[in-house]
Amino acid sequence: MFNESSIYFRRSRKNGNTEYLLDISLEITGGELIRLSDYNIKYCNSCWVCQKTGICPVKDDMNEKLIPMILESDGIVLGTPVYFNNVSAQLKTFIDRTWCIKGGLRNKIGGAVVVGRKYGAESAITAINAFFLKHEMIVANRGISGIGYAKGDIESDVEAVEAAKRLGYRILELLNV
């Protein structure tokens, strides 16, 4: 099982389609669901201070709460609705702000979950998996892509629901390697 601080990050409506799929995997792996919308995360300033000091100078919940949780976790599953053929702005901001912990996520497990309206999912999954690879993480699978728009639509996407279960079991398999 993921340790207590393993994280499922998401940015979407509370109890929405993306969260529905994340909850399915989370029930299998254990861990904690973190809603990025509940945190104050400022944009990366591209100041490069973190590359010189190892510490991001931006004072917000990312530095004070989320980064410590990420570093303690066994892995991260990132979930997002598809916005304009990519990840949400909140998730992209989160991704950008992890530059200060480059090397700190090496060999942690990563999983991607996206929900959209039939287009853009591949771009969103590619962005998430690029994040994992940039941090030298172990990508659990190619990513989960669900089809949904209105709240609850995802429940009828049987393929995505089954894929979310498989993601959970794959993460457990990787933890035991």
Image (tube, rainbow, N blue to C red):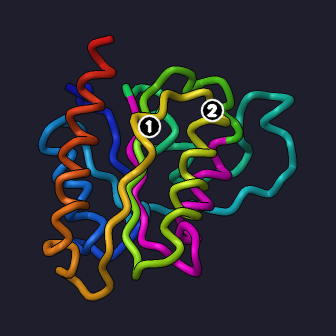
What type is the residue that disc 2 sits on?
His
Establish if 14 lies above or below 20. below
Q: Secondary structure at mark 2?
A: loop
Bounds of the magenta segment: 75-98
Q: Where's residue 46, x and y in %?
A: 83, 53
Residue that appears at 60% across and 61% down: 92
Q: Which label's residue is closer to the chain start, 1 or 2?
A: 1
Q: Residue furthest front?
A: 159
Residue at horizontal 30%, vertical 19%? Answer: 175
Residue positioned 26% across, 26% down in the render: 3
Image quadrant occupied by the C terminus: top left
Q: Which residue is mark 2?
A: 135
Residue 97: mark in rendering: none
**Which quadrant would residue 65 be assigned to in this image?**
top left
Residue 110: which numbered mark, if any?
A: 1
The amino acid beneath tag 1 is: Gly
> In this view of the protein, which residue sits in the foreground, 20 or 47?
20
Q: Is residue 87 above or below residue 9?
A: below
Q: Position of residue 123 (x, y in %)?
A: 59, 64
Horizontal side of residue 140 vs 155, given as left or right:
right
Instruction: Judge from the rendering whether residue 79 lies leftward or rightward of residue 131; answer left or right.
Output: left
Q: CA distance from mark 1 to mark 2?
A: 10 Å
Q: Position of residue 11 (x, y in %)?
A: 41, 66
Does residue 121 show up magenta in the picture?
A: no
Give the residue at the far top of this rendering.
Answer: 177
Q: Is 155 situated above or below 92?
A: below
Mark 1: few/some/many CA within 10 Å (<14, 14-19, 20+): many
